[in-house]
Amino acid sequence: MKRDRQLRVQSGTAATAHDALVPVHTRTELLAAVILSLAASLLFFATTARGIGILPDSVAYMRIGTARHFAPLYTWLLQTATLTQIDIVTAAWLLNWFLYVANTVLILRLLFLAKFDPVWATFGTILLIGHPVFLEFHSVAMTEPLFIALSLAAVLFFVRAMQDSRTASAALVGAIIGLGMLTRFAAAPLLPTFAILRLLAGSGGLAKKLADCAVMTGVCAAVFGSWLVVSELTSGHSTGRSLELLGDADLAYWLGTVRSASTMLLPSVVPPALRVLFLALVVGAVIFVTANHALAWRRLSSSQRAQPQALVPVVFSLLSILYVLFLIASVMIQYRLNLTGRFLLPLYIFLALAAMTPFGAMSPGLMGSRKLGIVLAGLAAAIGTSNVARTAVFTLSTYESGQGYAHKMWLTSPVLASATKLPLTAAIYSNAPDLIEFRLRRSAAYLPRRFNHLSGRDDAPVPFAQQMDAMRRHLAEGNVYVVFIYGVDWRDYLISESDLLHSVPLDEEQTLADGRIYRGAGNAIDMPALP
């Protein structure tokens, strides 16, 4: 009986190999793509009714401010759009709208490749694009939408490359991976994923497979490495991170990360113990489904393994594993890296596709179990219900208030209103210069940094003591103001207000509900340095 099931998996896989690569032409498939694209657009319009959300990193991507430790592709696209005289914030809105629709279509296409019928492919797509975190990061000017789009496109082109075995196709896959790494460094796991699967599947001998791996690697290295080298030579910075173990994660950190991951599935109002238990059930189900498919896949011949409906689940399963390993390595390397929704969202997408796509192939080993079907349907229904409820709340909230620095609270901020009245010739130091530059469109500088927030050490090109000396000289010249914005309270690497008052002479200009403004008092150079 087991052998019969294995044979049916093999024959079904081989029979649909060519059809899976045929472009979508049927009326129902096109209709599904149009309806989902319209639904995604409506959600996007609602959540960006007050403008696209602007987070601190968004300001850096727009090159407003001084941060330069981010991958550059998203910034390049925005800057290119501004050449047409489009405002950079409008350019971000247009780009993210396009990417939301593009990611919707890419997910739908992957489910069609896995041999889902249009109805189930539509439901599967909704489970992903309707997730509140998916919607959130498509409605703020962040790199996640572009990273997701390039990752999904890389998988699609890799599947096609496994069919035609052309060197040009392998080169194209490598180029897409390189572009993904220029968007987020977390795209790196794509390359070993594809290299491993190329060695295990597809036509050609070992020499051909190794050659394809070398081409993918070489092109990826050329795309990403060229920027890395040029950026280091011209500006002295690129990734902003050194290959040292600077992380400080302990047991409490990982327990907190598990709790955070559980909120990807259920709302935070659910007790943590229940959320973690549900997460464990979902992870167990995903492992069971993906392991079942992987075992069946290993029993196929090399050419049969390369068929789309057989290969796609394995791609996302292996990618999920390597992405988790990448996150663990990142936590060990970067100081105080918190695995927030922007890191967990790609993992959610990869795991969801890894768990869903095996069912498109109608593998008897999976579809023959009634109990398994009931369990998986129950888990999917719970996640879907949670998504609908949370997405509705999120959409209503952002429709009314906006997000991040575009939130309506900053329109009525007393400290920002007062900062607008400062002399145009005055220099400004602040704990939130990015907010000032974005909202007020005038330059501002960060307060001196006690340590580098990426390393936890005072290893900046200009050490803290020298930053303080420079600030004292600047204050002594006059016409310098310091603006503290209390709504921005997460930058503990900057000198605090109390320490600054003990280090430089400042006269209090205004005390407001959400901040305080000081003016340099002179004699700054005579003030003692901090111990």
Image (spheres, helix red, strand yellow):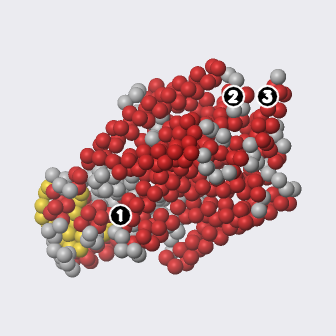
What's the CA distance linking mark 3 and mark 1? 54 Å
What's the CA distance linking mark 1 and mark 2? 47 Å
The residue sitting at 43% across, 67% down in the picture is: 78
Q: Up-down: is 213 above or below 288?
A: below
Element class at badge 3 = helix
Q: Is residue 249 visible?
A: no
Element class at badge 1 = helix
Residue sitting at the far front: 27
The residue sitting at 16% across, 61% down in the picture is: 417
Q: Which residue is mark 1?
A: 90
Left/right of residue 110 with respect to residue 476 in the rendered view: right
Whether the residues at callouts 3 and 1 have beta carbons within 8 Å, the answer is: no
Query: Within 10 angstroms of label 3, few (less than 14), some, or many (20 or more) residues?
Result: some
Left/right of residue 355 with respect to residue 19 in the rendered view: left
Q: Amino acid at mark 2?
A: Leu
Q: Which residue is mark 3?
A: 5
Quadrant of the rendered image containing residue 86:
bottom left
| Number of disc labels | 3
Q: Residue 169, which numbered label?
A: none
Q: Earlier in the sequence, mark 2 or mark 3?
A: 3
Left/right of residue 73 with respect to residue 415 in the rendered view: right
Q: Which residue is mark 2?
A: 366
